[in-house]
């Protein structure tokens, strides 16, 4: 099974939800809960050939045709559709809260975070063609409601400013 999702869109959380676990703490990262998850699967690209197929792959690559090329034996590919800005802002916020407490310049870090992901998703955009299941976080399913609440609870002026500067620059 492959679970493909934007960072911050709840891929780990969905896997645990799918297994029947419902006792989530809001705004907590669950990356550490899954054993045997190699981070080299996070940002897959055209050079990712030869990676070992695993029973469960969590990836931020949301381009299903690429995933099918890299892992032709995978029969189940689940894509979590979410708003890119909201998802990245949530991931950045959680990273700030839990990994980078000593971050000196939050705005510069937010700009670097947005820039990296904007480039990655420009090259490997979301394409759900051939996915087995699409979880749309804008619908009314129980999991979507959980994630909508979490995505909507994040407010970061630094991240908003970083995105606004990039959007203004792209015009």
Image (cartoon, rainbow, N blue to C red):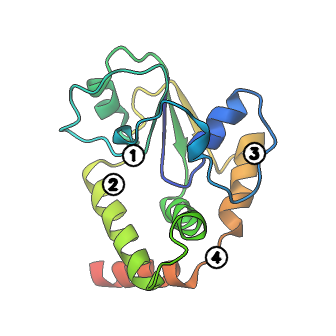
Q: Quadrant of residue 60?
A: top left
Q: CA distance from mark 1 to mark 2?
A: 7 Å
Q: Nearer the viewer, mark 2 or mark 3?
A: 2
**Which residue is depicted at the point 62% across and 33% down?**
15
Q: Are marks 1 and 2 in contact (CB under 8 Å)?
A: yes
In x, y percent, where is residue 76?
49, 20
Q: From where the camera sits, is residue 141 visible?
A: no
Q: Quadrant of the C terminus?
A: bottom left
- Residue with the mark numbered 1: 126
- Residue with the mark numbered 4: 155
- Mark with earlier residue (2, 4): 2
Q: CA distance from mark 2 to mark 4?
A: 23 Å
Towards the viewer: 21 or 138? 21
- Mark with earlier residue (4, 3): 3
Q: From where the camera sits, is residue 75 visible?
A: yes
Q: Quadrant of residue 87?
A: bottom right
In x, y percent, where is residue 115?
32, 69
């Amino acid at each position: 099974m492959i679970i493909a999702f934007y960072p911050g869109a709840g891929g780990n959380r969905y896997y645990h939800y799918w297994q029947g676990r419902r006792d989530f703490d809001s705004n907590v990262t669950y990356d550490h809960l899954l054993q045997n998850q190699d981070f080299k699967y996070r940002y897959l690209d055209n050079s990712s050939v030869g990676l070992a197929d695993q029973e469960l792959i969590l990836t931020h690559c949301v381009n299903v045709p690429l995933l099918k090329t890299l892992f032709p034996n995978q029969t189940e590919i689940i894509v979590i559709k979410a708003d890119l800005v909201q998802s990245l802002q949530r991931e950045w916020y959680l990273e700030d809260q839990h990994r980078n407490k000593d971050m000196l310049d939050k705005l510069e870090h937010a700009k670097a975070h947005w820039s990296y992901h904007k480039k990655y998703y420009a090259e490997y955009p979301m394409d759900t063609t051939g996915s087995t299941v699409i979880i749309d976080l804008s619908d009314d399913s129980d999991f979507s409601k959980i994630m909508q609440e979490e995505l909507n609870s994040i407010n970061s002026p630094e991240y908003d400013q970083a995105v606004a500067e990039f959007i203004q620059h792209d015009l």
